Image: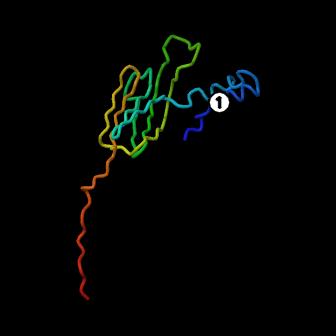
C-alpha cells in the first residue's frame, strides 16, 4: 500500500488550512519520493516494467535484483558537468534505491533487461508451479 497515494488531496487540505503553497517550503523532503518512476504492465503470464532513469551514462551503474514477487532497482545517476555551476536543481542526481512489489511471483532465471533513451525495460515471466516435479515416495513396510 502506498502511503502517499492520496497526497494531492492532503496537499490541498493543508494549503487550504495553512495558506496557499504551505508545503512548497518542504518540497525537498518529498521531491524524489519514488525514483525511478515506473510503469508496470502485465498479461496473464508476463510483466513489463519500464523505469525512467535519464542521464544513466553507464548501464553498470544500475543493479536489478529480483526476489520472488518483488524487484529492486539500485543505481547512480550523475548529471554534474565539469566547468558548470548548478543553478537550478530539479532532475534527480545521485544514488537511488527502489523496491517494487510485483502482481505475481516471477522466474528469477528468465529476465530480459535493456536500456534505451533513458528507459530501463525489464521483461519478467510468471513463476508457474511445475506439477511435473511431484515425485511419488515409496513407503517401505518395516517388519517387527
Identify the element where label 1 is drawn: helix
Which residue, as the protein is rendered here, is positioned at the far top?
Answer: 83
Q: Position of residue 93 (x, y in %)?
A: 51, 23
> Which is nearer the eye, 23 or 78?
23
Graded by Cα atoms within 10 Å as few (under 14), some (14 to 19) or many (20 or more), the crowding at tag 1 reads: few
Please state which of residues 100 and 19 is positioned toward the viewer in this rendering. 19
User: Residue 144, position in %: x, y?
Assistant: 26, 89
* Quarter holding residue 27: top right
Residue 2: x and y in percent read 56, 38
Q: Residue at x 53, y 31 (%)?
A: 34
Name the residue at the right extreme: 18
Tally of numbered tags? 1
Give the side of residue 31 with respect to residue 120, left or right: right
Residue 48 placement (x, y as % from top left): 37, 33
| Residue at point 34%, 38% (across, down) | 46
Colour option used: rainbow
Please tell me which residue lies in front, 116 or 7: 7
Left or right: 117 as drawn, with respect to 15: left
- For label 1, the residue is 9
Q: Is residue 94 left or right of residue 110?
A: right
Outermost bottom residue = 144
Residue at image location 72% in from the left, 29% down from the top: 14
Residue in front for this viewpoint, 17 or 112 = 17
Tell me if residue 70 comes above or below residue 141 in the rendering: above
Q: Quadrant of residue 131?
A: bottom left
Query: Looking at the figure, which quarter contains the N terminus?
Result: top right
Amino acid at each position: 500500500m502506498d502511503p502517499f497515494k492520496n497526497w494531492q488531496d492532503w496537499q490541498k487540505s493543508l494549503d487550504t488550512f495553512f495558506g496557499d503553497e504551505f508545503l512548497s517550503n518542504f518540497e525537498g523532503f518529498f521531491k524524489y519520493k519514488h525514483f525511478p518512476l515506473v510503469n508496470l504492465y502485465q498479461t496473464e503470464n508476463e510483466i513489463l516494467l519500464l523505469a525512467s532513469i535519464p542521464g544513466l551514462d553507464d548501464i553498470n551503474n544500475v543493479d536489478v535484483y529480483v526476489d520472488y514477487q518483488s524487484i529492486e532497482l539500485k543505481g547512480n545517476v550523475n548529471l554534474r558537468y565539469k566547468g558548470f555551476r548548478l543553478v537550478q536543481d530539479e532532475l534527480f542526481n545521485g544514488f537511488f534505491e527502489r523496491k517494487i512489489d510485483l502482481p505475481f511471483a516471477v522466474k528469477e532465471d528468465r529476465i530480459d533487461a535493456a536500456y534505451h533513451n533513458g528507459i530501463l525495460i525489464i521483461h519478467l515471466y510468471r513463476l508457474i508451479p511445475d506439477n511435473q516435479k511431484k515425485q511419488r515416495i515409496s513407503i517401505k513396510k518395516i517388519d517387527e
